[in-house]
Amino acid sequence: MSTPVAMLHPELLGTDVIEAISRDGRRLDHAALRDSTRTNTARSSRRGMTFSMPIEAICNFGTLAERSALPSLVQTTKVPVSVTAKLQPVMPASAARFYDDPLGSLLAAFKDSLQRMGGVFIDPAASGDLLAPVRAKIADAKIMCSTVPEIAGNRDIAGIGAPQDLADVDFAIVRASFGVAETGSVLLSDADLHVNAVAYLAQHLIVLLDPADIVLNLHHAYRRPEFRDRHYASFHTGPSATADIEGVLIHGAQGVRSLSVLPLARGAGNPTH
């Protein structure tokens, strides 16, 4: 037969305890129990004194245990101010770059980061039609949806009545609000997409990015006005991918199968109609 905890350790009961059962089943005197808990519970000090388990009234079948036999279970040490003053926080290198380190060429850094995340960097044509590499990628596509004036699609984004109407799009062409060199991410807002689902339901996503709109890192990115002015804004870093099953990498599991970025200044392309 187990022994009630209240009988073994009455001091663990709070001052709101109404009654406790002793070993032989009789009620203990509530006033006595209250007075005992007032004098034998752990105390703390604003000055940071040691906390410990109550030890003065721990009973073993009603017998008071010796103080020396019950060492404190919790010990704290007050660290001298002279020691804590030496423990100054260390700023990580990435945070230090928030200010003036240009990180070399932002476009080159963005390209490297994008490719590491599985994205495709499209080198612009040296001359002539700057969008020629994009036209080559979409030449065999059946359904294209474009939200940019530089290149036309055959699925008008303005005529989309519901997100599911974009489920059969092969290529979507959009322009990013800005890019992040440190992560290779592009930010797409509701103003860029018109219908947010186009960035997820299309099989492939092509993003136009003005090199002047590339920021150094996420510290700079979150200071951009898009996070205040837009109803929707999302970072896209490479294609959708998962490797949950047997470590096999699969692209397009929850979104686009490929994400390509063409560096192109705003207004630099030749609009098509």
Image (cartoon, rainbow, N blue to C red):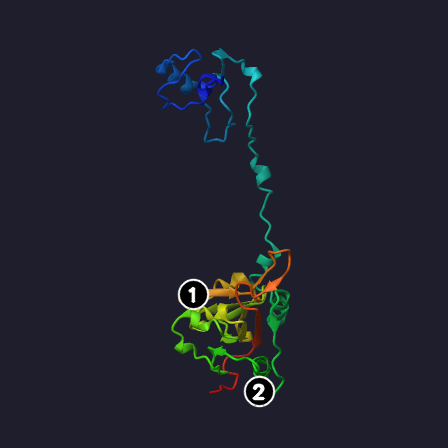
Residue at left 58%, top 73%?
A: 260
- 84 on left or right of 18: right
Between 55 and 198, the one nearer to me in the picture: 198
The correct choice, above or below, for 66 with respect to 261 in the image is above
Q: Quadrant of residue 102?
A: bottom right
Residue at left 36%, top 18%?
A: 19
Residue 230 at x, y percent in the picture? 41, 67
Distance, label 2 to label 1, CA atoms, is 32 Å
Between 32 and 207, the one nearer to me in the picture: 207
Is disc 2 placed on a helix, strand or loop? loop
Label 2: few (<14), some (14–19) or many (≥20) C-alpha neighbours in 10 Å: few
Query: How many numbered dots are placed on residues in this image?
Result: 2
Between 210 and 21, the one nearer to me in the picture: 21
Q: Amino acid at mark 2?
A: Asp
- 175 on left or right of 104: left
Q: Which mark is residue 74?
A: none
Q: Are marks 2 and 1 in contact (CB under 8 Å)?
A: no
Label 1: few (<14), some (14–19) or many (≥20) C-alpha neighbours in 10 Å: some
Residue matched to label 2: 129
Residue 150 at x, y percent in the picture? 50, 83
Residue 89 at x, y percent in the picture? 58, 48
Is disc 1 placed on a helix, strand or loop? loop
Q: Amino acid at mark 1?
A: Tyr
Q: Which mark is residue 232?
A: 1
The correct choice, above or below, for 229 with respect to 263 in the image is above
Residue at left 45%, top 65%?
A: 233
Residue 7 at x, y percent in the picture? 45, 16
Residue at left 36%, top 13%?
A: 29
Q: Quadrant of residue 16?
A: top left
Nearest to N terminus: mark 2 or mark 1 = 2
